Amino acid sequence: MKTDSIFYSLFQTFPSIFFELINKSPAEAVGYEFTSCEVKQLAFRLDGLFLPTSNPEKPFYVVEVQFQADEDLYYRLFAELFLYLRQYKPVSPWQVVVIYPTRSIERQQTSQFSEMLAINRVRRIYLDELGEVAETSLGVGVVKLVIEAEETAPQLARRLIDQAKQQLTDEVGKRDLINLIETIIVYKLPQKSREEIEAMLGLSELKQTKVYQEALEEGKQQGLEEGLTQGKQQNKLETIPRMVEFGLSEDAIAQLLDLPLEVVQQAVQQTDG
């Protein structure tokens, strides 16, 4: 199951769920942007970053989703963190959140990192220990669905879909969350067809309702607008190698294309590679 992509899609679309997961108000998400960032020196990449958009006194969060045992995780994670601090010198204080399915997956490397793991700036979340909050919170329940056993996952998914119908008033957001729940079940039950899963979750009738269809059309329009923006960006990136051939500097290309210099430099590096 592609847990990383599921989680990052979840946090990208519903950032409030992350703040629920760390016992903060979902409203905190309004002041944050979820993104990723490359640390250039060693081509490290922080895949999950919640960056405050307006209040620099709020912390920024480095989020790591780890579903496989990795002896090097903390070596890599703290190296990426401190290289990021050295390179970008953010004003906001840092916080690290590592999400595990269970404690048994974690490899602490206590001889090197026991003190680091004990400080308040580092938080480890074990999904199988979420307890009551996973029963009451819609967002945390969706996170818990990722590790739910195949036998009980459809039942939990149906309960979460019912919660979404009752609690969410934004029709597009409701549709997106229900689609995400369905996607998790598709990954968990690859032997089932999409039609079988729709029937299993009671989605066949829901998807035929007028409200759902209207939300689908609105979502498609939003996706089209975002796609056009991404398409323009891609067209710009495709012109960079040609501009380099004509002898233009990276600074000049960035100004001509109205792109950040780092984006141009990265495109040039990929071309050289």
Image (cartoon, rainbow, N blue to C red):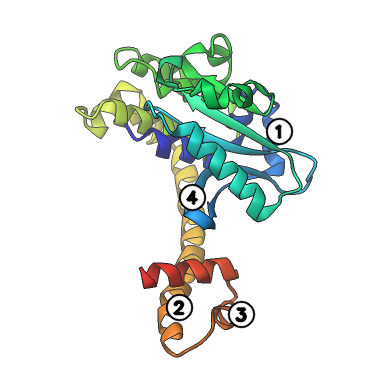
Disc nearer the start of the sequence (3/2)? 2
Of the pair 42 and 235, the residue shown nearer to us:
42
Say how many tags the image has. 4
- Given the current orientation, which residue lies at the most extreme bottom position? 246
For residue 200, side relative to residue 119 (left or right): left
* Residue that badge 4 annotates: 44
Question: Is 226 rendered above or below residue 100?
Answer: below
Q: Classify residue 187 by image quadrant.
A: top left
Q: Residue at the spot x=40%, y=29% of the render?
A: 71
Circles 3 and 1 in contact, beta carbons < 8 Å: no
Q: Residues within 10 Å of mark 2 (few under 14, many from 20)?
A: many
- Residue 124: x and y, percent? 56, 23
Q: Is residue 189 above or below residue 148?
A: below
Which residue does the image show at 45% across and 31% down from the upper left?
178
Which label belongs to residue 27? 1
Amino acid on which disc 3 is placed = Gln
Tell me which label, 1 or 4, sits earlier in the chain.
1
- Frontmost of labels 3 and 1 is 3
Q: Nearer the viewer, mark 3 or mark 4?
A: 4
State which tag comes first along the sequence, 1 or 2.
1
Reading the image, the residue beneath label 2 is 240
251 and 204: which one is in front? 251
Tell me the element at label 3.
helix
Question: In this picture, is 72 found above or below 153?
Answer: below
